[in-house]
Amino acid sequence: MRLNIILLISTIMLGAGLTFWLDGSQSPSTPTISPQITTEKISGEEFPQFSFVDLNGKMHESEDYKGKIIVLNFWATWCAPCIIEFPKLIKLAKYNPDIVLIALSSDINDDKINQFLKKNPVTEKNFIVARDNKRKITTDIFKTYKLPETIIVSPSGLIVKKVLGDIDWNREDITLMLDNLRNGL
């Protein structure tokens, strides 16, 4: 009996040691997740009509912004990449007063958003922050399930780009795209 227990423990220890040794001999391959700019499926589609109420209680209609470049960002305070991206969006709005930036949060209530905004104040008039009540716009209209995600809309009301993930909004390709949209290209 005693010999059986010793053999069992030895087998378990040998198996565990072999597992750790084999796992350690392989180099961990951590995939790097980089933001993607995609135009598949949505590019050229008309920007849908929807309404939302911002955190100040003001009603907005998507069609009110036709004729302007719209940057529609889906985010949440519990989303780490969203938190990293948010100050970049504030900068984008600050240095591009001719665009309308709409940040729709997937948070359940306004309290978390307001706490977040105390640390990341939005003072630009072209930056609208709202909570997407029950994610009706995020999931029902735009079929967005991963955050952050951003949709860029031309002044003519066509969806131009869809950006998946956190991105540096000061990148050369983004600046060029915005300039082209301004110039009607």
Image: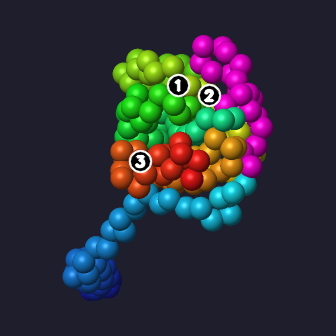
Q: How far apart are marks 2 and 3 (CA)?
A: 27 Å
Which residue is disc 1 drawn over? Answer: 126
- Count the numbered circles shown: 3
Are the residues at dot 1 and dot 2 in contact (C-beta closer than 8 Å)? no
Taking depth in this image into account, of 129 and 147 the one nearest to the observer is 129
**Residue at (49% x, 46% y) in the render:** 178
Picture coordinates of residue 50, whole percent (x, y): 76, 34
Which residue is disc 3 drawn over? Answer: 175
**Residue at (69% x, 49% y) in the render:** 158
Numbered tag placed on residue 131 in the rendering = 2
Q: Is residue 87 left or right of residue 148?
A: left
Are the residues at dot 2 and dot 3 in contact (C-beta closer than 8 Å)? no
Q: Is mark 3 on a helix, strand or loop?
A: helix
In the rendered image of this protein, does residue 29 appear above or below residue 175? below
Q: What residue type is labelled 3?
A: Thr
Picture coordinates of residue 93, whole percent (x, y): 45, 31
Of the residues under marks 2 and 3, which one precedes in the sequence? 2
Disc 1 versus disc 2: nearer the observer: 1
**Residue at (64% x, 41% y) in the render:** 155
Q: What element carries label 2?
A: strand
Q: Give the range drawn in magenta.
A: 46-65
Are the residues at dot 1 and dot 3 in contact (C-beta closer than 8 Å)? no
Q: What residue type is labelled 1?
A: Asn
Q: In which quarter of the view is residue 162 placed? A: bottom right
As for residue 78 lying within the magenta part, the answer is no
Q: How crowded is mark 1: few (under 14 residues within 10 Å), some or many (20 or more)?
A: some
Q: Which amino acid does label 2 sit on?
A: Arg
Numbered tag placed on residue 138 in the rendering = none
Q: Distance between the residues labelled 1 and 2?
A: 17 Å
